Image (cartoon, rainbow, N blue to C red):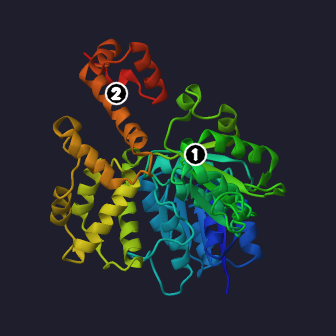
Amino acid sequence: MGKFALLVEDDTSIALVITAALEDDGFAVERCDSIAGRDRLLAERRFDVMLTDVMLTDGDGIEALGEVHAAHPSMPVIILSAQNTLDTAVRASGAGAFEYFPKPFDLDELVRAARQACQSGEGGVEEGAPAGAGMPLVGRSHAMQEVYRMITRVLRNDLTVLVLGESGTGKELVAEAIHQLGHRGKGPFVAVNTAAIPRELIESELFGHEKGAFTGAISRTIGKFEQANGGTLFLDEIGDMPPEAQTRLLRALQSGRIRRVGGNEEIAIDVRIVAATNRDLLPMIAAGQFREDLYYRLNVVPIRLPPLRERGDDIEALARHFLVQAVEEGLPRRQLAADALAILRTQPWRGNVRELRNFVYRLALMAREDLIEAAAVEALLEQRPTMAAGADAIDFQAALEGWLSANSPPVGMLYHSALAAFEKPLFEHALAATGGNQLRASQLLGINRNTLRKRLDELEIDPERFARRG
């Protein structure tokens, strides 16, 4: 039997993403943006759960909840609010709310709460329950809420998306979310790491080939574009694509047609393109390494995925999420004590979400008790090279080994990947050491001052942050 939810929310972006998440979980959702609309819908039909914002277009969503409860005593209510004060939380509790979610919230937790609310005799959110299926992204930080808003803007269209972010931030998860929650969700999702394919095979991988097209082509092979027909094609590490393949990719995007290697027939393709890169494409364009026209074809809707250091509030939720995933991978069921979570929050996680996930998996494997205490976390931290004590005090070789342990650059990209990871902190160190003086920083680095200025702009480093005050 289906579940029916009433969503009372006047922020269109938030309403869209909540609706998509609930529908993905099997809910039928009716939405309105006012108290008047809420009352009209409640009079027309029965709902299993209501999710309501506090500040609505025509009043306070909490004030009249007593009347709603009286008329619909079996319908649980979940309160959503951007007014994240103790007073709001107390009012929500006093009004008999089943659950209260301050904005920004974790969509997985919200869907799970709605699901639990529909189960008679249940109360609250079950501790340790698996995250909601179909929502690959985890996090309630402001930085991730901005990502969610950008995702909602592309769910109902086929605009090309370029996901920008450091290695390990979860760029493929953004692509999966766009696919799963969008109108192509029932079609195929095909991911290809363009940096991991040998240069001479990348066109065959993308566009397929005909029998006899080259030595070893013993039969016709369908490429990634055709495999993704009707769905989404995710092109990861697009900045590492060879120039000749860039040309053919541009032609395919412009025409909506492809031609297999060695073939003469043009094949119409219907795919949504999501590309991603951890590289800064603009200097690559200036250096002639990346086509400018392809860049503008891909960069229709850019989504910047923040590094974990910019979303520290998400570390606890991510760690718990990975413990649940670890069980699904056959590892023991564990929980993290509060002091253990506090230590995780202090770590730099230069390998971003991927490094945190791998560390939590190792914790789940090696911990001797079901409840992981701080001592277990500290012991495991001591076994790996880390920059947690500060870059100035750590041997560079150890720092590099720590980065490599959390990342797996594809063959042929080790140099560029390591350079991209270490260049920004190197410049920041030079600026910090010179109080933000660019001339002295360039001298310290041994590079031209104009080169330093250019790279600071490209890396979005503000020298004023390092200026000594007073």
Sequence-first tag of 2 and 1: 1
Q: Quadrant of residue 1?
A: bottom right
**Please, is residue 382 above or below residue 310 in the view?**
below
Which disc, if any, is residue 259?
Answer: none
What residue is shown at x 77% (from left), y 75% (from top)?
Answer: 44
Q: Would residue 15 be seen by someone viewing this image from the given angle? A: no
Mark 2 residue crowding within 10 angstroms, few (<14) / some (14–19) / many (20+): many
Which image quarter holds the C terminus?
top left
- The image quarter containing residue 469 is top left
Q: Which residue is mark 1?
A: 238
User: Which element type, helix, strand or loop, lies under badge 2?
Assistant: helix
The image position of residue 60, as x and y in percent, is 60, 55
Left or right of 447 on screen, residue 453: right
Instruction: Categorize mark 1 by other alpha carbons within 10 Å: few (<14), some (14-19), many (20+).
Output: many
x 71%, y 58%: residue? 213
Residue that protrudes farthest toward the front in the picture? 215
Q: Amino acid at mark 2?
A: Phe
Res 427 label: 2
Q: Position of residue 463 (x, y in %)?
A: 37, 22
